[in-house]
Amino acid sequence: MISRDLFLKSLQPLQQYLKSGDAELEHAIEKGYANNPWFFPDFTRHAIHAIADEFLDEVKCARWMDLYPKANQTGKNIAIIMAGNVPIVGFHDLFCVLASGNKAMIKLSDKDSVLPKFIVNKWIEFYPELSSCITFTEKLEGFDAVIATGSNNSSRYFEYYFKSYPHILRKNRNGVAVLTGEETSAELKELGKDIFLYYGLGCRNVSKMYVPEGYDFAEMEMAFEGWNFLADHNKYRNNLDYNYAIYIINNVPHINLGHLILKEDDAIASRIGCVHYSYYNTEKELIENLELKRNEIQCLVKCDKLKGWECVSPGNTQYPTLGQYADGVDTMLFLTSL
């Protein structure tokens, strides 16, 4: 267990390093891309900078930690099963475990096995005291609680194996955008980030849009043109072509933007390279539909407020703050209450 002061002091050196463009860091990014072709280097750099800006800022972190007076009092061993859909997506869980005064036992996804280790080792290089609080392992044993992130299918296994332990078990969720038709072209361009970053594979990526009846997608098509390059990615292209063929064969109405397919569908989750949309007539109807899907929604994108929902402005879904917890479950409260 490390003290609050030491933890906070350890942040700035790592923050500076992650923003430095160091050759060793760049090599790790390229190595991660070779290990997983979905980890496009520019997207990985985005993930790294988001962590540096939102998590490793000492002032922001101290303010966040002040909300949890019981931090640094437990000293439990916490098993973390990390996902591999987005580069270093499990860093927030590790960060919470350390900030709460606990120790992390990490099981990495094969899809993201390079950068988490590299960044942790660099952090330990700056502050060796952290080494006693972080362990990477293939076999989890001797833990007091568990945080596991996976698919709806893997979650069933998690529920069985970890039912006797205090736990946070996460399933599939997705981002949703609500449009009014009054968005500017700049706001629609920002929405493109929420859809296309990480090829749409993240739980905070927008996979579903609610649009007013009669919405014209022409301006959106122009706003998304800057993401055409994604269609050159082999794995993304294969998914795009497969989905397009399925829709054509089955006479499914859709809008093909070339690098993205828009399909009217009630479902929140969509295929790779596709985004669903539904029409609404009134805000009351919209809120009722959203409420029915609340447990499937990770975050809601909207330019202004919506009653009963915390809204993220377009372009910011992939910049979660320390206090924006996955699935709406307060990880720090869980950890400091053990």
Image: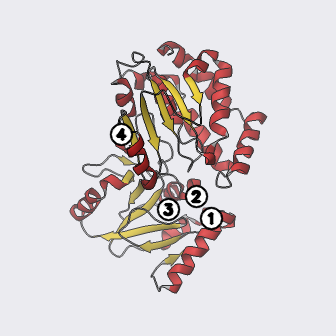
- The residue beneath circle 2 is 199
- For badge 3, the amino acid type reads Ser
Mark pair 4, 3: CA separation: 48 Å
Is 52 placed above or below 66 here? below
Q: Nearer the viewer, residue 228 or 28?
A: 28
- The residue beneath circle 1 is 236
Q: Element at badge 1?
A: helix
Q: Nearer the viewer, residue 263 or 110?
A: 110
Mark pair 4, 2: CA separation: 34 Å
Mark pair 1, 2: CA separation: 7 Å
Comes first in the chain, label 4 or label 3: 4
Q: Specify few, some or many for label 3: CA neighbours under 10 Å numbering under 14, 14-19, or 20 or more.
A: some
- The residue positioned 32% from the left and 73% from the top of the image is 213
The residue mark sitting in front, 2 or 3, is 2
- For badge 2, the amino acid type reads Tyr
Mark pair 1, 4: CA separation: 37 Å
Looking at the image, can residue 42 be seen? yes
Comes first in the chain, label 4 or label 2: 4
Q: Are marks 4 and 3 in contact (CB under 8 Å)?
A: no
Residue 184 in the image, given as x and y percentages of width and height: 45, 60
- For badge 1, the amino acid type reads Tyr
Q: Are marks 1 and 2 in contact (CB under 8 Å)?
A: yes
- The residue positioned 73% from the left and 50% from the top of the image is 34
Comes first in the chain, label 1 or label 4: 4
Comes first in the chain, label 1 or label 2: 2
- The residue beneath circle 4 is 163
Q: Specify few, some or many for label 2: CA neighbours under 10 Å numbering under 14, 14-19, or 20 or more.
A: many
Q: Element at badge 3?
A: helix
Taking the image as shown, residue 125 lies to the left or right of residue 309, namely right
- For badge 4, the amino acid type reads Lys
Taking the image as shown, residue 78 lies to the left or right of residue 329, namely right
